[in-house]
Structure formats: C-alpha cells, structure tokens
Amino acid sequence: MINFRQNHKKRSSRRDERGVALLVAVLITSVAMLFSYAVTSIAVKELTLTQAGRDSQIAFYASNSGIECALFHDLRNNAFDPYDTPSGDNIRCAGRDVSINATSLGLWPRRFTSGYFLINGQANGPCFDITIIKDQDSEGNITTSTESRGYNTCDLDSPRRLERALRATY
C-alpha cells in the first residue's frame, strides 16, 4: 500500500510541475511583450519629437530668411520708404521676387506686407511672410518694426505645420 501511494504522489507532482512550467512560460512571455510594447511606444514618441524639432528648425530658418531679406532691402535700398512706396513693388529674396503691398498710404502707421514667399518654389516646402510697420512719433522720428513669420510648410491644411516668428525694431 505504501508503494502505491508513493508512486501516485510522484505522478501527481510531475503533473503539477508541468502546469507551473506552463504558467511561468506564459508570464515570462507576457512580461516580454509588455516590455517590447513599452520600448516601441517610447521610440515612436521620440521619433515624433525629433520630427517636430526638425520642422521647428526649418520654420525658424524660413523666418530668419524673411527678416534678413526685409532688413537688407529696407536699410540698403530704402525699399519701404513711407513717403514713396507704391503698392505692388517687388524685392528680391533668395533669387526670387517677393511682392510687397503697401497699405494705409498717407496715414501713420504705414504697413507693408508680403504674401507667402515659397523658399524652394514648392507649395509644401518652407515659406515666410513679412510685415513692415513704419510709424512716426510726435517729433517726426520714424520707428520701423519688421516681423517675419516662417513656416516649415506652406500647406495650410497640414497638421504638422509650424510657425516661428522673428521681429526687429529699429
């Protein structure tokens, strides 16, 4: 009788061990899958942040291109003369013409604006627009405020469109 019980115990403990081994295997697989999901999720978020940083830099450089062009033409060529700038004049930026529209002529402040200037000529590429405001104080001194807004893409419907702006006042 004792032999029969010892053999029965051995067989049932082996079955229990097989069940435990299966449970441990399922738990280890679940933990490994959870870990790989977490690593993948972090990698996707990092990729999104990297792309946003790149797009932000493109928008900033587009804005910088616009303000440098406007400052050059204002200070060197007096392109935004508040007394004599007809609407529709052009300035040249990056080898292309930028149309400048003068508004509020005859009144202070005088405002000069451009439409979107496509840097590489493609609608989905970077672009900028500039606004120059010239104002006269009571002593006759003219103050100029130049603002350039740069965009990583000129596609108005793009969910990834970023804007960066620079302003210079002199």
Image: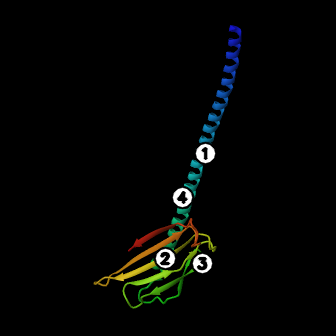
The residue identified by callout 3 is: 96
- Whether tag 2 and tag 4 are in contact, CB under 8 A, the answer is no
How far apart marks 3 and 1 lie (CA) works out to: 49 Å
Q: Look at the numbered disc 1 and give the secondary structure of its residue.
A: helix
The first of marks 2 and 4 along the sequence is 4
From this view, report whether residue 10 is shown above or below residue 64.
Answer: above
Report x, y in % for residue 76: 47, 78
Report x, y in % for residue 42: 57, 48
x 62%, y 38%: residue: 30
How far apart marks 3 and 2 lie (CA) works out to: 15 Å
How far apart marks 3 and 4 lie (CA) works out to: 28 Å
Q: For marks 3 and 1, give the one nearer the viewer.
A: 1
The 10 Å Cα crowd at callout 3, few under 14, some 14 to 19, many 20 or more, is some
Which residue type carries mark 4? Gly
x 59%, y 72%: residue: 155
Examine the image and state in which quarter residue 55 appears.
bottom right
The residue identified by callout 4 is: 53
Quadrant in which the C terminus appears:
bottom left
Examine the image and state in which quarter residue 53 appears.
bottom right
The 10 Å Cα crowd at callout 1, few under 14, some 14 to 19, many 20 or more, is few
Q: Look at the numbered disc 3 and give the secondary structure of its residue.
A: strand
Report x, y in % for residue 5: 68, 12
Q: Is residue 78 visible?
A: no
Query: Residue 130 — which label?
Result: 2
- Whether tag 3 and tag 4 are in contact, CB under 8 A, the answer is no
Which residue type carries mark 2? Ile
Residue that lies at the very extreme toward the left in this rendered image: 139
Which residue type carries mark 1? Tyr
The 10 Å Cα crowd at callout 4, few under 14, some 14 to 19, many 20 or more, is few
